[in-house]
Amino acid sequence: MKVLVAGATGGLGRSLVPQLIAAGHQVTGMTRSESGASSVRSFGADAVLADGLDADAVRAAVEKVRPEVVVHQMTALKGGIDFKHFDDSFAMTNRLRTEGTDNLLAASQAAGVRRFVVQSYAGWNLQHGGSAAKTEADPLDPNPVPAQQQTMAGIKHLESAVLNADGIEGVALRYASFYGPTGDIGKGGSMVEMIQKRRLPLIGDGTGVWSFVHYDDAASATVKAVESDVTGVFHIADDDPAQAVVWLPEFARILGAKAPRHIPAWLGRLAVGDVGVAAFTEIRGADNTLAKQTFGWQPGYASWREGFRAGL
């Protein structure tokens, strides 16, 4: 199939484009710059230039390629995340999730695209409390903290727009927290450096549950979604949701670093705000059962423990 990947040079795109090509698809990567286009071509794909926020450029790019499937992986998170000012860190990504999604969807509809797969997220935005891992049938968090409300709105917009688009088979893949090359949780990444320098403490009781997925496993699930005719929302995560009190000390051990410091929630709130405290004490992980059953997908790294050891 002819597949257009918007955001082809991001962390996931770098795994996804080669996997799509290996699966026999004709792939074009949409990127904003000539340097990005060169990277896309180095993967063996064609390239087309367009800024996701430029509606005319996006329409021209999609019309030129006329793909059967469009995959929206556009984000802008290279500057890291400031937990106290979470929405500010996601400001450009939120525009890509709203304006960018609308531009790409409109262009896809005009060009007769059959299927549209979009990058969503599964983590802090899932309902807090209750079971350790939430399914797609569980609601998103109805009361995000003020610093995350704009980002939650962006996630809800992209999912609703894609799943309700006329004439389009819409799929929203809620990826868990990425790890692997070029990521914050990867060799030389910001979170790895923080753990090595003991700058990422365990906050409160550490019962917040995290789910992870390696870029390669997220890409393989995306290939399955591209090739399917199923629509809807799917959680893409490994099989091992883990409380912060479990994964953070184990990650430090794998890195050969000292165990993380432990600070009370009130002190953590001063340092990283309500967002950071919730991440360590309240959030819930993602159940991947539906994606596995629907797509016949299995993560190569069933647990972050294996993936962290292999890649870091």
Image (cartoon, rainbow, N blue to C red):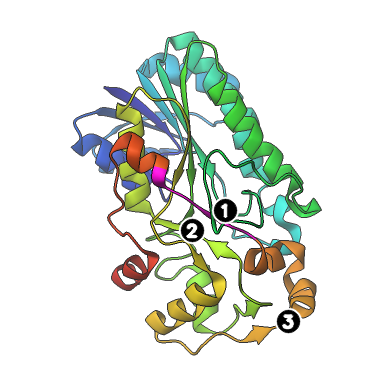
Q: Residue at x 50, y 75 (%)?
A: 246
Name above or below for residue 238 compared with residue 5. below
Residue 224 visible, this angle: yes
How would you rate the neighbour count of disc 2 (Cα within 10 Å): few for under 14, some for 14-19, many for 20 or more?
Answer: many
Tell me which residue sits at (38%, 61%) in the image: 180
Give the percent coordinates (x, y) of residue 67: 35, 19
Identify the mark at residue 100; answer none if there is no mark: none
> Is there CB contact under 8 Å for labels 1 and 2?
yes
Q: Nearer the viewer, residue 287 or 131?
A: 131
Image quadrant for the N terminus?
top left
Name the residue that disc number 3 marks: 264
Q: Whole-Å distance between the Cαs marked 1 and 3?
A: 22 Å
Magenta span covers which residues? 283-289
Question: Mark 2: which secondary structure?
Answer: loop
User: Earlier along the polypeptide chain: callout 2 or callout 3?
Assistant: 2
Assign a secondary structure to mark 1: loop
| Vertical side of 156 occupied by 15: above or below | below
- Residue where numbered disc 2 is placed: 211
Q: Position of residue 254 (x, y in %)?
A: 38, 80
Q: Which mark is residue 123?
A: 1
The C terminus lies in which quarter of the figure? bottom left
Magenta region includes residue 22? no
Mark nearer the N terminus (1 vs 2):
1
Pointer 1 or 3: first along the chain: 1
Task: Place residue 6 in its image quadrant.
Answer: top left
